[in-house]
Structures are given as C-alpha cells and as structure tokens.
Amino acid sequence: MCFRQLTLRARLVCTFLIFCFLQTQAKTFGQRITLKMQNAPLVTVLKEMRKQSGVDVFYDNKILQDHYKVSVNLKNAELKDALNEVFQHLPLTYHITKEGISITKSAAKPAQSIEAPVQDVINVEGRVVDQDGEPLVGASIVMKKEGRSTLSDVKGNFALKNVTKGCFLVISFVGYQTKEVGCREALGNVVLEILDNPLDAVQIIGYGKTSKRLTTGAVSTVRTEELEKQPVSNPLLALSGRVPGVYISEGSGIAGSQVNIEIRGVNTINGATRPLYIVDGVPFTSTPIEQTSGNQIVNGVVGGGFSPLDNIPTSDIESIDILKDADATAIYGSRAANGVVIITTKKGKAGAMKVNANIYSGVSQLVNRLKMLGTEDYLAIRRQAFANDKITPTLANAPDLLSFGEGYTNFIDYLYGNTASMVDGTVSVSGGSSQAQYLISANHRTQNSIFPYNFNDKKSTIRFNMQTHSQNARFFVNLSGAYTRNLNNLPSASISYYYALPPNLPLHKDDGTFFWHNSYQNPAAALKAPMEATTHNMLLNGSVKYVIMPGLEFKTELGFNRISNENYRAITRESRNPNTTVNGQLSYNLNNNQNLSVEPQFTYQRTLGPGRLEALLGGTYLNTQSTQPLFFIGSFTNDALYKSLTSVLMQFTASGNVESRYLSGFTRLNYVMANKYIVNVNARRDGSSRFGPGNKFGNFGSIGAAWIFGEERFIKDNLEWLNFGKIRGSYGTIGNDPYQDYAYLATYASSAFASNYSGVSSLMPLTLANKDFRWEVTKKMEFALDLNFLKDRLAFTAAWYRNRSDNLLIQVPIATQTGFETYLANLPALVQNKGWEFSLTTKNIARRDFSWSTSINFTASQNKLLSYPGLNKSSLANSYVVGQSLSVAQNYHFLGFEDGIAQFEDFDGDGTITSGSFVTTGKGDQIVSGNQDPKFFGGINNSFQYKNFSLDFLFSFVKKDGYNIYYEGSSVIPGIGNNLVADVLNKPFRYTTMRSGPAAIAYNRYKYSDAVFEDASFIRLKNVSLTYQFEEKAVKPLGLKNLSVYLRGQNLLTFSKYLGFDPETQGLAVPPLRMFTVGLQTTL
C-alpha cells in the first residue's frame, strides 16, 4: 500500500514537473515580437529578438561574415513567425531546440547530372489596399529577381501570369511602406502601411504628386502642423525662416498688409517677384488690392496694398508646396518665372462624423520705439537754428517757440502705443464613407489695430469640400469652394509722418475740441478720417476624373476665383482744419478681379522594361478679367452721409475693364527605373493675349534627372551609416509676360480733364503702342545632393542654382515731348541669380517620454546685372550698374563735417556735388555703397516633446544692408520745425530753419550718402509654441476625443544693430508686431 502510494506520488510529481517544464518552454518560445527595422544588419536584428524573447541564439561568426541586411516590420508576432520573416530571403536556416535557436547555412542542393526539370509556374492575383481597406490605384508590383512588373487597377487588383513558384513580389506606392510577399495564386489583400519617413511623404507638384525620394525638382513642403503653430493672418508669414531659398518680408505689421516673397531672388528689372499661386488647382489672384485713388495704401498704414492671400485662413490649409527650379516650374510655363506656391486645403476623410474646433485669443504691440527729442532739447535746437540763420522768430514762422507752450507728446506712443487685441476661431465638420467624404469649415478672425480709436480687421470664411466616386471606382468627382468676407477699417491719413511733429504741439484745446494751426496737421483729428475696405473672395473648384482603362485616365479641372473690393476713403470735415477747408472729400472705388480656368488632362501609367512610365498631356484655358465699374472723387457737407453716394457732389468719375486670355498645351514624361534612376521631362507652349501679333506664343520646358545612389549594392555594402543618397539636377527655360494688358496697343480714355468739343468729351492717350516686345525668358539650372544618415536621424540637402533672365520687359522712360513718360519694351540686359541652399534636420534625442529634433536651413544668394549694352547712354544709367545687384545702392561718399555742414567727395572733379552714377556714366558723384539684397538668410527650429508637453521655437536670421530711417524724409532737416530722434544730439549738424541754403542742401545729400547706409542684419525669435495634450481618458468623460491647450508668441525678440524702427521693413511702415496668444484645440 505504501509502495503504491509512493509510486502514485512519484508519478504525480513527475507529471507536475513535466507540465511545468512544458509551460516554461511554451512561455519562452511563445513570446511575442514587435520589431521594425529597415535595411538593418542581421546580427542587430537577432540581438533585439533575443532581448524581447529571452531565447538564446547560437551561430558561428563565420556564417555571418557576409553582413546580411534585412528589413522587418513585426507587430506582436510569434517567435516562429518572426524567424520565418527574417530568414525568408537568406541562405540560412534556423532550428529551435530546448537550449535556444541555432543558425546554420542552408544545405546546398546536389548538382544534377541531367537537365533540370522545368520549374512550376502559377498565375498570381491580389489586391493592394491601405490600412482602411481602400484600394491603392497605380501601385507598383515588381518580381524581385525577374524584374517583370505591373500596376494595380482602379480597384487595387493586379495579376501576373506564368510566375515561378517561390518567387517574391515587391509592392510599392508613393507615401506607403514597400512590402515583399511570397508568390502564391491567391494573395488576397496586401495591406500597405503609411510611411512616417519624410522621404516618402506626399509632395504636391504641378498637375500631380510625388515624394521627396523620387522627385527630380526643388520642392519644399510646409505642412499644417507647422503652419498652425504661428498665429498669423497671412499663410505666407508662416513660411518665413522655414524654407530655404524663399525670402519673405512683411510690408507692414498691420493686418491685411502685403507680404513680399522672393523665390531665389529677383529675376527681372521690373521688380516683379510675385510667384504663381495655385489654390486647390485654381490660379489665385495675387495682385495687391489697392486703395480708392488708384494708389496703393502706403505711408506706413498698409504697405503695398492689401494681400489677397490674407483671405485664406491658415487653419484651412493642409500643406504649402513651394516649387523653385525649372524641373518643378516649367510645367506652368510663362507664369512661373518667379516660382510657384501650391496651397492645398484640408479634405474630408472616411469615418464617423467628427467636429474639430480651434480657438485662440491674444494681444499684439509695437516692439521697438524710437527715442525722440524731448521738448527742452527740441526747442533749444529750434532757437539755435534761428540764430544760425539770423532770423527773428515770430508767431508766423515759429509758433512752436512762441505759442505752443512747453508741453510734451510722444507721438510714436500716441500713434502706435496701443495694445491690439485679436480673436480667431475655426470649426470644421468632416466624415464620410469609403465612397464619399466631406468637410465643412468656418473661420472668423477679428484683429484690432495699435492706432487710437476703433480700427480693426474682420474676416469670416466658410469652406466646403466633397469627393466621391462610383462603385466600380472608375468615375470620380471632387467639388470644393470657399467664400471670404473681409472688412478692413483703417485710418485714411498718412499717419506715419506724424511721429516727427513738434513734441509741444497741443492736440486739444482746454474745452476738449481739436487744436488747429495752419502750419501743422492734428493727428488726433486726422485719425477721424476713415478708410473702409470690404473684400469678397470666392474660390470654386471642380474636377471630374474617369478611368478609361487600367493605367489611362482623363481628368478635367474647372476653377473660378473672384475678388471684389469696395472701399471708401473719406477725409471727413471733422478731420480737416476748419480754418482752411469746409467740405469733406470722398474717394470711392469698386474693383472686381476674376479668373476662370479649364484644364483637361490625360494621364497614362504603365510598366516599361525594368521601370515605371508616367505620361501627362493637358491644356489650359485661362480668362482673367479686371473691372472697375465705378471710381469717383467727390465732396460732401455732412460727415454722417459720406456713404450715401447720392449726397456726394461728384468731381471726377471713371470706369474701366481689362481682360486677358491664356491658351496653353503641356506635357510631362516621367520614368523611374528600379527606384534608382529617374528622368523627368516637361514641355509647355503658352499663348497670351498680352503680346502683339507674331509674338503671342512662347515655348518653355525642362529636363530633370536623379540618381538614388544609396540603393546601389556597392554603397549599401560599404556605407552602412548611409540610409539614403541622391544626386539630382535640372535645366530649363521659363517665361515671363509683361503683367500689363493691351501694352502692345495705343490706348485712349475719356477724361473729365481732357478738352471738350461742343460739350462732348474728348479722348486722352494713355499708352504708346509697341507691337514688337516679346517674351521675357529665364533659364534655370540646378544641381543638388540629398543624404540621410544614421537610421534617418540626420537628413541633409545641398543645392546650387543659377537663374539667368534676358530679353527683359520694362517700362522704358522716354522724352516727355512725346506726350508719354514710358513705353513697354525688351531690354538687351542679362540678370543672374545664383546661390546655395542648405537644409539639415536632426533627431537629436528620440526616447519614449522625451524627444528633441532640430531643423536648420541656410541660403546664400547673389543677384547681378551681367550685361546691359548701352547702359551708360540710356535713361536707366543712374539706376543700374553692370556687375552689381539690381538693388544697388549708389550714394554720395561722406567725408565728414565742416562747420556743421556735411562734406562729400567730388568724383567727377567738376567742382560741385551732383547726382548721377559716376560708375556707369563717369558723371555725377554717386558711387556704389552696396546693395539691399539679403546676403544670406535662414532659420533654426527646435522641437521638444516631454510626455504630453511639446515646445517649439523658431529663429529666423538675415544678413543685409539698408538705409537708416533716421535720415529719410525731406521734412526732417534739423531745426526746420519737426522733431528728431535723440541721436541727432550726437552729430555736429548745423541747424537751419530753411529748406534751401548750404546746410539744408548738404543734409539732403547726407540722407542719400553712405553715412546712412548701414548694417540691417537681424536675428529674430520668430515663433514660440508651448502645447499640452490631455490624456484621452481624461477628456473622454467630457465627450471629447482629444483636447490640447497652447501658448504661442510671434516676433518676440529681435537682435540687430539697426537703429530704425525695424530692420525688416526699414521704411516708415508699421513694423512687425509682437504677439501673444492662448488657445485650445479639440475634437468631438
């Protein structure tokens, strides 16, 4: 009995021990593996698998001397499945034993003495889809060894016949991770995952898409994540300091003002630098919206007119792609000499309806304020000026000395010292099924000004997008539209000059009414003169696509853009000196600008030999109209009725209508061979109504090529640290038209100022005819190198470019005896822009709870007028110098002061100081002091993330020269009756009350001498963004899917030696304002 019990117990113990052992083994060999490596050494992969599984791996070091590389993407895979994935393409095999995993070489097949039997073949069928199960149309399927290939059709399906058993297929699609699968007859769905590698992110190009990996052109992309971090009203401002080769400066810090953009420099003498803007496939009107009088709103309120791009909310934008070289821009022909900016707005995505909201509020203020003279110093200078001129002060010539008293007003603080508030909110609703998606968004922004009184800019936008396709995925429709209403309320007066008023000038009388003096304007009263501009912007786009057969599709893009601007500029009676004027003055203007475009396109894709061919054939019809239904100047007697046009006495009226047309054909051929060798050819023929008979058509084109040398076997085997390497280059010709309609015709207009004959108005000549001017041509060349190092932790790009423009179009000055001032013609001049662009992105730290990345871009550029035959005898002799930049600064050479009067060098030796370019003509005394081009510029952005916190800050920098505002403007002769900056006390000027005479003449020369041309370089903390992302579990009880709060700042700090308001604007315009905002972003 005892023996049986012992035996039973022993059996139970053994059974238990065996069970425990088996469980241990099962637990050990049943460990799950999650691993993602690209082109990694086999040894590294095995070490990571051992670390995750705890299972030892045994192998002979000699076996792995061949440095095998593998790519794996495993997620929660069993150990055996993971091993199969690793060794499927290697001449190695593995065995699992109780001790661990042993690696050995695969047994070699014995040699056959007879002819080998024919290999079995199969027909392979499958379907390529994304992670949501949606078909990927045009995916590439390549047999790994044989090189045979095909493309997936509109449903993602593909088929390969007579495929050898045991082969492997390489399946790829732009923006998705390449996948290898073994051949079998029914593959089913092959799911490709979206790549997080920036090399494979989608880049928008002209009439198509590509990736940074496969592009042959110079394209820079800024995505919504970067755009939304900057609380700016104009999306172009969000590009400043982020894009190599793109120089951006603000015309003014006031909301709605023009933003200046130069893509690889200024290519033409006429100064036009605006690129072509494409918004959702539609050419966008980018001409500045001008003021009522026909002149741009300048003098520091809104420099250069209102920007139409201010009507596109940054929150609506998905990405901005900047096309720079010939390969990227030639497909747009004559409109792309200054580059192309493609703006893509957000689209709906399949899934349940979701509501996104982004709301922020903030304040802005002037950063730098000039230190002006106090009343005591100002009056001392005025008294000294009268003493120097031996003139006795009187109430007529010196009211500031005898009647204004000794009060003090800092007019810079008064005019620009307010804190401006702003609020911005965007709400969007999106969703849809796999067959149809939608998005509707609304944005409102109110931004007040820093001026006294209630001036502001209000903008409201509604946008929609809908895309759908038929069940058989052959017919696609995309509709989008946006409408913006912008109400801009600003001062009508040129208030920037008021900063130099006498500091003791009273603004109000003791009874609170305005103080008036016939010699000075009252800025408090001048601000009562309003300027109201209402802009309506409508953008509509529709596209229809039909897949004719696999690889061949037809698409038509229809676009319409209309900008209508109505503005009133009223100089009210309240704002005018009642001693000199009685009635108010009104200027009214109604402008309409619109584009209508139709672009049919055929696209054909197919595999050709060892590569993939894509062909594009299309045409463009573009109709542009600019109408001015009504423009007039009139007077009124009641300020309350100035908007009632029936109450205004008309003094001058006008209207006009301008129309131009483009008709073009274009094509592109792109061939990618083995994902290593790429050739891209563009061609376009443009016809424009802006040219005369015989010159209406121009031909443009480019060729680009790239070699991804990092995919070569000898590179992979010897440069393990290099993940990606590409050399690319391009050359092509781009056109430029005159930006002026009917310039080849002699034009006339009826005018109230022309003579009347028997009560009938006559016609007045406007322009002189010239039917012979032709297309301006820019030839662009580029060579570039793209590199990724150390598992893509470092990404580097270097590019050299050269643009040469000839046959330049310009308004040439002519003798006034002809009755005209200028006429449009081609100049025999050659302008060159060349430079270097560098960009570096680093992933400095990449841990689970903490990451740090840095992006740096740097551009060094040079603009030069290479040749201009006969320049010294032309009317432009004093404007340009061969061998110098188009922005050349020709100034008097300052020698010093003599008895308080500035002295200058007499270069031409005629005994007098005269204006004129001594360098070009040998006459005159102005020489080259430099130029106003940026010598180099760029930006440095750092991004930190710690758990749920993220911090980004962007520095931008510019090296350039410029004029010092202290000495600009004819009204600031020291002692003449205007206030001066305090620095004038440090200079031995001879003060004078006269606008003529030796002291005044010398000072006016001093303002245009090299003494005031100085370093205007600066480094600016452009943007700081601090965000906290709440955990999903914390906001879910609130009915939210996510919630983040943020603090952001713009133009926070500027480091510069420049002595004026701001080194970026330099002139009298309001400089960029410092802004602080706080906001939240959520999804319901």
Image: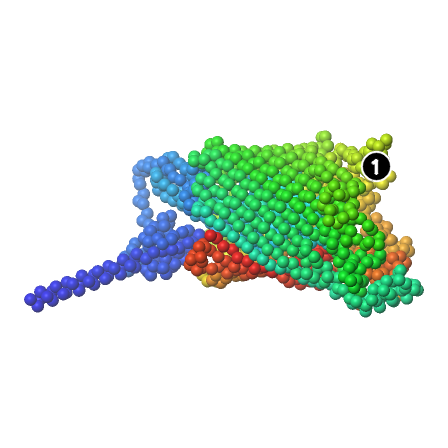
**Residue, x 62% and y 49% (percent of image)?**
459
Residue 154 percent location from the top left of the image: 45, 36
**Residue, x 33% and y 51% (percent of image)?**
81
Task: Look at the picture and state if 555 lies above or below 274.
Answer: above
Residue 863 percent location from the top left of the image: 70, 50
Q: Nearer the viewer, residue 410 or 782?
A: 410
**Residue, x 41% and y 41% (percent of image)?**
128
Residue 894 visible, this angle: no
**Residue, x 36% and y 41% (percent of image)?**
187
Q: Could you tell me which secondary element the residue under label 1 belongs to?
A: loop
Horizontal side of residue 519 vs 138, given as left or right: right
Where, by quadrant of the figure, is residue 1075 drawn?
bottom right
Q: Nearer the viewer, residue 708 or 256?
A: 256
Horizontal side of residue 607 vs 95, given as left or right: right
Q: Residues within 10 Å of mark 1 (few under 14, many from 20)?
A: few
Under mark 1, the amino acid is Ala
Where, by quadrant of the figure, is residue 928 drawn?
bottom right
Residue 92 percent location from the top left of the image: 35, 51
Residue 264 percent location from the top left of the image: 65, 49
Q: Nearer the viewer, residue 204 or 352?
A: 352
Which quadrant holds the N terminus? bottom left
Give the residue pinned by disc 1.
754
